[in-house]
Amino acid sequence: MLFASPVYGVFLLVTYAAFWALRRRSFARPLFLMLASYVFYFVGTYEAAKEQAVPLGPLGWTLLCVAIIFVGSSLDFYVGRMLGRTENAATRKLLLLCSVVYYLGVLSVFKYFDFAVDSFATVMGWVGITVAPVHLRLVLPFGISFFTFETMSYTIDVYRREIPPADRYLDYLLFVCFFPHLVAGPIVRPKSMLPQLAAPPVASDATKAHGLFLIATGLCKKIVIGDTLGLNLVNRVFDNPERYSSLEVLVAVYAYAIKIYADFSGYSDVAIGSAKLFGYELPQNFDAPYVSRNLQEFWRRWHISLSTWLRDYLYVTLGGNRHGTWKTYRNLMLTMVLGGLWHGASWNFVIWGALHGGALAVNRAWQRRPGARPERADDGRPRFTPATLISVFFTFHFVCFAWIFFRAPTFAHATLMLARMGKLTFDAPNLAPKVLAVLALGIVSHFTPRTLFDRARSGFIESPAVVQGIALAVCAYVLHFAAAAKAEPFIYGQF
């Protein structure tokens, strides 16, 4: 049930109408929304399972995936309740360990087992010992990395006494499975979401209009820009870089940078907009990351819910910047390498994380060099001074370089991409005018001043319902015209 599919549109419309038709102060609303979220996950998982060879068959595998979420949610709710009632330090640590072990165990089995045994066999091969790895070949449950981080943050926050335990079991189940953020985020914090679920939902006409605006713009990013670039250039070049010239490979790297932003920020916009229709606020996840002056700013703007989670629960836990310069650099590197592994069980993701970790350490050292001027706070306005333009240029190109390892199917593909660019061949028969136009649209829209987007949003929200309907109908026509025969999966749905 992809966000970009007509099925999701019907599901959202039916769920919205039924939700607001229920009694306001009744538990029926959260109960209905929880059940609808499980239906959403069940249908999406079952449809995907039918296309793959999964253990237990499609139905059995889908029920297992649903059970993983439900059992984990139930475990964490009762662990949280016991943490709230227990003062004994050893007991509290044991309760936290139960929650963490469950989710890390699920991740280890489903996401990292095959990667670990393959890596072990490779290392043994280096010393002359042949090991035949045993593979589980399990299909990754949708959204496992996202709901794992959300639930872990709940028990950690309760353990740290930063939030009280959830009062209602139903609220906590809905916090975990709420369908807009279930599959690919944003990663929702319990301290912001649980209070919303405890109160009766309220959504004004302006809030709902804002939600519709975000859904429409998010789908345009995804379908018009992301899918067009992916299907017509990015996928072809990254899968077979040896067939393309240096110029085509370089343009494909730029195109992937725009595609992954359009795809993932588009997903986040649809998720945030869908939640607004039910009266709930999800956190902002992107803020024009490619206008960043340095890598530290990039991570304040890119996948904000993940970067702040890694900062608060991993970087700070490792010691942050509290124990000297070199340990700070070590903590940055470990945080980003583990953040890379969070994306998938592949050495390419490890390399991508290490590149960002090392660059963040260099960035930090440069900012703290003797005589360095304090960095000005970002006010969201475009910056056109020569120094800032140079900083944006180099930051963007470093990010693009790292994206090569993130997107390439294997390390060999990544090195082949770099080798092809080094050939310095400039013929470009595969760069269709349509693709170049969409790429230009993606770049220009990304660097458009925020105020213009804010005015467009305000204009839509303040318009009469008839005008809003016409605008949405035009958007639907554009999406229908631009859509491929089969909807492209969202990139972050695989994590």
Image (tube, grey):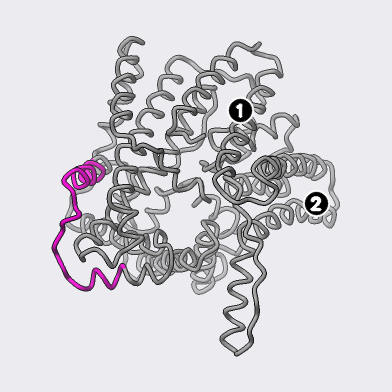
479 sits to left or right of 125: left
Residue 193 location, quadrant:
top right
251 sits to left or right of 47: left
Residue pictured at 49% horizontal, 67% vertical: 350
- Give residue 384's position: percent from left, percent from top: 18, 49
Q: Main secondary structure of the magenta part?
A: helix
190 sits to left or right of 464: right
Magenta-colored stretch includes residue 419: yes
Residue 5 location, quadrant:
top left
Helix, strand or loop for disc 1:
helix
- Give residue 432's position: percent from left, percent from top: 18, 48
Question: 428 or 351, which is in the foreground?
Answer: 428
Residue pictured at 35% horizontal, 31% vertical: 217
User: What are the residue bounds of the magenta stretch?
Assistant: 417-444
Asked if the residue at tag 2 contacts the one at tag 1, i.e. Cβ–Cβ closer than 8 Å, the answer is no
Q: Which residue is mark 2?
A: 95
**Which amino acid type is marked by label 2?**
Leu
Picture layout, residue 150 above or below residue 21: below
Question: 109 or 388, which is in the foreground?
Answer: 109
- Give residue 403's position: percent from left, percent from top: 37, 60
Magenta-colored stretch includes residue 64: no
Helix, strand or loop for disc 2:
helix
Picture layout, residue 236 above or below residue 121: above
Residue pictured at 63% horizontal, 25% vertical: 33
Label 2 neighbourhood size at 10 Å, few (<14), some (14-19), many (20+)?
Answer: many
Q: Which residue is mark 1?
A: 196
